[in-house]
Each structure stands twice: as structure tokens, then as C-alpha cells.
Image: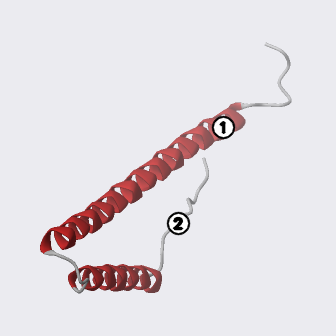
């Protein structure tokens, strides 16, 4: 089997940048909806739409992450099987 596995991750700076970017964009849209010169029902509809977009974005991100984790596990299992076959194979042995 392979001795070391590479774990892909993000740096703390990248995570912080993504979190700040999300907060700024959500606040900007929220303020834009709050200060629109429209009635309360239109403002509420837009706020609800914004909430729906945010929650569906989190759901999509989780689904993408889960799919990547499944593919990663599948690749590791396939690699382990291949490593086992290669370790057991003797190229100098005659036909069985």
C-alpha cells in the first residue's frame, strides 16, 4: 500500500477570505433589499428569495463536498487493491 496519503485542504487565510467575502456580499444584498424604495411585501419577497439562495448554496456546496469525499475514498480503495495485487504478483513464477 502507499505509505502516505495527500490530504487536500485550504489554508486558514483562504478560509478567512471566503468567510469575509460571503459576509460582505450577504450584507450588501441585505442592505440593498432593506433600502429599496418599494413596499414591505416586495421587500419581504426579495429577502425571502435571498435567504433561499443562501441556503441552497450551502446545500449545493455540501453535496459537492460529499461527492468529492466519496470519489476520494473510492480511489484509495482501488489503489489499495492494486497495491495488494502488485505486492502478491511474482513475475518470475511460472504458469500455475
Q: Position of residue 35 (x, y in %)?
A: 23, 86
> Viewer-proximal residue, 78 or 2?
78
Q: Residues within 10 Å of mark 2 (few under 14, many from 20)?
A: few
In the picture, the disc for residue 90 is none
**Tag 2, which secondary structure?**
loop
Residue 80, placed above or below residue 21: above
Outermost top residue: 96
- Which residue: 26% across, 85% down? 31
Q: Residue at x 36, y 78 (%)?
A: 22
Q: Which label's residue is closer to the chain start, 2 or 1? A: 2
Left or right: where 61 falls relative to 88: left
Q: Identify the coloring.
A: secondary structure
Q: Out of 21 and 44, give the one closest to the viewer.
A: 44
Task: In the rendered structure, find residue 82 and report the number of the disc placed on it.
Answer: 1
Q: Residue at x 36, y 81 (%)?
A: 25
Q: Position of residue 55 (x, y in %)?
A: 28, 61
- Residue with the mark numbered 2: 8
Relative side of 55 to 1, left or right = left
Q: Is residue 22 above or below residue 69?
A: below
**x%, y% of residue 23?**
32, 82
Residue at the left extreme?
40
In the displayed structure, 2 sits above or below 30; it is: above
Amino acid at each position: 500500500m502507499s505509505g502516505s496519503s495527500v490530504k487536500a485542504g485550504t489554508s486558514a487565510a483562504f478560509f478567512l477570505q471566503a468567510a469575509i467575502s460571503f459576509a460582505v456580499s450577504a450584507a450588501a444584498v441585505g442592505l440593498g433589499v432593506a433600502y429599496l424604495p418599494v413596499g414591505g411585501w416586495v421587500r419581504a419577497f426579495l429577502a425571502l428569495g435571498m435567504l433561499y439562495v443562501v441556503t441552497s448554496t450551502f446545500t449545493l456546496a455540501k453535496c459537492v463536498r460529499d461527492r468529492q469525499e466519496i470519489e476520494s475514498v473510492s480511489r484509495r480503495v482501488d489503489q489499495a487493491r492494486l497495491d495488494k495485487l502488485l505486492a502478491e504478483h511474482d513475475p518470475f513464477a511460472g504458469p500455475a
